[in-house]
Every structure is written in structure tokens, then in C-alpha cells.
Image: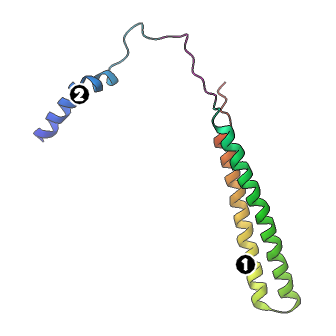
Amino acid sequence: MNFLNTLCVLALANPVISAVVEPPAPGSYRPDISADFSNPFTSPLNRIAGIALGVSLILMVIFLIAAVVLFIIGKVFHQGKAQEKGLSIVLWGFAGAIALVSLSGLVFWLTSDFKIA
């Protein structure tokens, strides 16, 4: 335990750590400096993510159309496995589409400009 006490005392005696821990000196506050909360670096990320998610949703719709066609073919020709596979693919496709839409909302929220009034 003595080693830990010595280590704590040495850490608190370090001038770099004490400068961080100590409050600022009187008169060091500068009210003419205001924070800039604009976020200019995220608009390209928003565009790239929007294109990727848009292409993913278009491919998902094509995938769902193919799954519905597989399901209908299975119904018409009385093939139980094709119906089962088609329905399974449709359900997984809807789950994937919901996940993609949720992800697009999250990306938009994370990359939008934060306005602090």
C-alpha cells in the first residue's frame, strides 16, 4: 500500500497533471471567444452514406421482387420447398430493409448539422 501512496503523491506533484487539475488563473477567461459548433466535415460522409444506403435499398427491392416471384412460382406449380424458401427470403428481406432504413436514419442524425440555439 505504501507504493500506491508514493505513486499518487508523485502523480499529483507532477507539474503537468497539477496544471490540468488546478483551476484557471483569474483573468484568463476570454468572453470574446465563442464556440463554433458547425460540423462541415460530415456533409461528404452524409452524401456517401446516402448513396450507399440508396443503392442498398434498390438492391433490396430487386431481391424482394425475386423472392416474391419465387414464392408465386412455388404456389403455381405446387412446390412446397419453393414456397417455403420464397416466404423465408421475403421475411428476411423485409427485416433487412427495416435495418437499412433504420441505419439511414441513424447516419443522417449523426452527420447532420448540430444546431445549438
Residue found at the very far top of the displayed protein: 27
Q: Which residue is mark 2?
A: 12
Is 91 on the left or on the right of 31, as rendered? right
Magenta residues span 30-38
Give the x, y percent position of residue 75. 85, 87
Tag of residue 88: 1
Give the x, y percent position of residue 27. 42, 6
Q: Earlier in the sequence, mark 2 or mark 1?
A: 2
Quarter of the picture containing the C terminus is: top right
Tag of residue 67: none
Q: Is residue 45 above or below residue 37?
A: below
**Residue at the spot x=67%, y=53% of the render?**
103
**Residue at the spot x=73%, y=72% of the render?**
91
Give the x, y percent position of residue 83. 79, 85
Quarter of the picture containing the N terminus is: top left
**Mark 1 and mark 2 in contact (Cβ < 8 Å)?**
no
Q: Is residue 26 above or below residue 40?
A: above
**Residue at the spot x=69%, y=49% of the render?**
49
Q: CA distance from mark 2 to mark 1?
A: 63 Å
Residue found at the very far right of the displayed protein: 76
Instruction: State the predominant SS element of the stretch in magenta.
Output: loop
**Label 2, residues with CA under 10 Å away: few <14, some 14-19, many ≥20:** some
Please tell me whether residue 36 belongs to the stretch shown in magenta.
yes
- Classify residue 3 by image quadrant: top left
